[in-house]
Image (spheres, grey):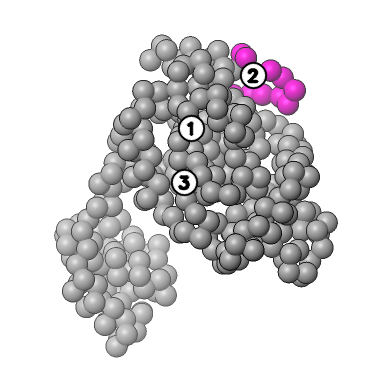
Amino acid sequence: MVGPTASGKTALSLPVAERLGGEILCMDSMQIYRGMDIGTAKPTKEEQSRVPHHLHSFLDPDQAFSVSQYAALARETIEKVAVPILVGGTGLYLQSLSVPMDFGAVGGDEQIREKYHRIADTQGREALHALLEKVDPASAARLHPNDVRRVVRALEVYELTGVPLSSQKMPGPEDAPYDFQLYALDLPRDELYARVDKRVDEMVGNGLLKEVERLRRGGLSPDAQSMQGLGYKELWPVLTGETRLEDAVSLMKLRTRHFAKRQLTWFKRDERIQWLPWQVGDGMETLVNLICERYLEQ
């Protein structure tokens, strides 16, 4: 179950998991943190008691976490679960599970990298970029000369493989290691935004500011990866007296609507996703039946 924030992923996934005997795997880059429950819209204890949940609340908020780390943990979990049901709106997490593990696994060579970095330091970035243009004009056209790290990587890949980075085969859906059935709830845009605003009000009413205050008093830095999440970064300045609560809430709503729009753009590009029309207030029984029937057919 994928899609934008506040679209109803949890409400749909729980009855599907119950019907199929499935277990839910978190695919949300904020719900992985302990003690960050309100602002991440994490499933409640009651909801989590209905079916087994995995990869929620396993990381301390002061720890950084990468997409590749998520992919490794998720793959381990998928292998142990009979009917894994991925639920979340982090597109990069889904992408990390949609490509072979060895994608991008062209090895690195420290000496080659050092050689090209020396060229950038001694002859300039333009000279380095010119070298790439000779062997991989497509990558050179895509990369700015100032993006030294990626220019060096493209040159390194060419030197190691003899094949330009731009000609390396990119994995497609047919290369996915899993047979995904992807679903998303398709709400009218105005209804989605109304749900976003309502959720923000509920989060604040349920004590989000106190949650942020507790994390701050625990010594967490505002620069921590976890504190870049929506709600946390807007409310932190309220605690330091830099802004008013009502202004922070308005900004949180605006940024969350923009985030939902970006999520929609991301997921609409994925042709595997089946968009399920749904109006707020309608029951989900028909959609649950549809998903379960399609799963059992395959």
Is residue 243 left or right of 128 when viewed as pictured?
Answer: right
Q: Count the marks.
A: 3
**Residue mark closest to the camera, 2 vs 3:** 3
For the residues marked 2 and 3, what is the alpha-carbon distance in whole angstroms?
A: 30 Å
**Circle 3: residue type:** Phe
Could you tell me which residue is drawn at 70 percent across and 32 percent down? 188
**Disc 2 or 3, which lies upstream in sequence?**
3
Is residue 87 left or right of 126 when viewed as pictured?
Answer: right
Q: Which mark is residue 45?
A: none
Q: Nearer the viewer, residue 246 or 187?
A: 246
Secondary structure of the residue carrying numbered label 2: loop
Q: Which residue is mark 1?
A: 53
Tell me the quarter of the picture where residue 154 sits. bottom left
Residue 55, visible in the rendered structure: yes
**Disc 1 or 3, which lies upstream in sequence?**
1
- Where does residue 282 sit, x and y in percent of width and height? 72, 19
**Image position of 173 with respect to 147: above or below:** above
**Residue mark closest to the camera, 2 vs 1:** 1
Could you tell me which residue is drawn at 55 percent across and 27 percent down? 49
**Circle 2: residue type:** Met
Q: Callout 3 environment at 10 Å: few (<14), some (14 to 19), or many (20+)?
A: few
**Circle 1: residue type:** His
Residue 270, visible in the rendered structure: no
Please tell me whether residue 281 belongs to the stretch shown in magenta. Answer: yes
Q: Callout 2 environment at 10 Å: few (<14), some (14 to 19), or many (20+)?
A: some
Q: Which residue is mark 3?
A: 58
Could you tell me which residue is drawn at 17 percent across and 58 percent down? 161
For the residues marked 1 and 3, what is the alpha-carbon distance in whole angstroms?
A: 11 Å
Q: Give the extent of the magenta segment.
A: 275-286
